[in-house]
Image: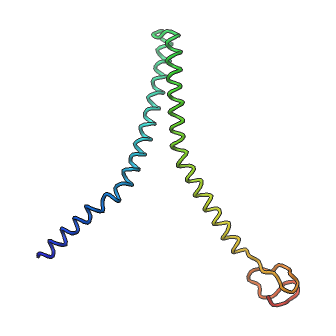
Amino acid sequence: MISAIFILVSTVVVIYVIRPLFGSQEKTQSRKVGRKRQLLETRESLYDSIKELDFDYRMGKVEEDDYKATRSRYQAQAVELMKEIDQNNGRAESSQDKIEQEIAALRGSLSKKRDNKKSCSNCSSPAPATARFCPQCGQAI
């Protein structure tokens, strides 16, 4: 009975101690997703503000000077926001590109190893990797 309680308490303590090690990745990913979601929501908000400003200008509620100044300010904010979104997406794409390049390099080196051809020591003509005799002179390879 006492050993069962000891095992139970030990298991709880080990889980409590190890849990932060695994939870940090989830928190980091959730922060990235949260930041991306926030950027996208801000972008939509800016687009809505620009549309509303255009509508108010067409209805005559906003003067031309105010319209131009406000619209240029909204556009500048949208440009900065889009640059930040592109930067966040660019990091993911560049790491994926690096991985793809490494895979292609590995595949290329593997195919070169597979395609290694033997050459005849007698006549120096190339022979397939599986050949035991030279196709030109018949000498054993």
Residue 52 at x, y = what percent? Answer: 46, 20
Residue 45 at x, y = what percent? Answer: 44, 29
Residue drawn at x 55%, y 45% as measured from the top left: 90
Identify the colour scheme used: rainbow
In the rendered image, which quarter is residue 107 located in? Answer: bottom right
User: Which residue is situated farthest in the front direction here?
Assistant: 17
Quadrant of image for the C terminus:
bottom right
User: Which residue is situated farthest in the bottom direction here?
Assistant: 140
Residue drawn at x 51%, y 14% as measured from the top left: 67
Q: Is residue 85 left or right of residue 128?
A: left
Can you say whether 81 is above or below 88 in the image? above
User: Which residue is situated farthest in the left direction here?
Assistant: 1
Residue 12 at x, y = what percent? Answer: 22, 65
Residue 51 at x, y = what percent? Answer: 48, 22
Badge count: 0
Depth order, front residue of 14/117 = 14
Can you say whether 82 is above or below 112 in the image? above
In the rendered image, which quarter is residue 83 located in? Answer: top right
Q: Is residue 50 left or right of residue 129?
A: left
Residue drawn at x 46%, y 27% as measured from the top left: 46
Quadrant of image for the N terminus:
bottom left
Residue drawn at x 50%, y 23% as measured from the top left: 74
Can you say whether 48 is above or below 85 in the image? above
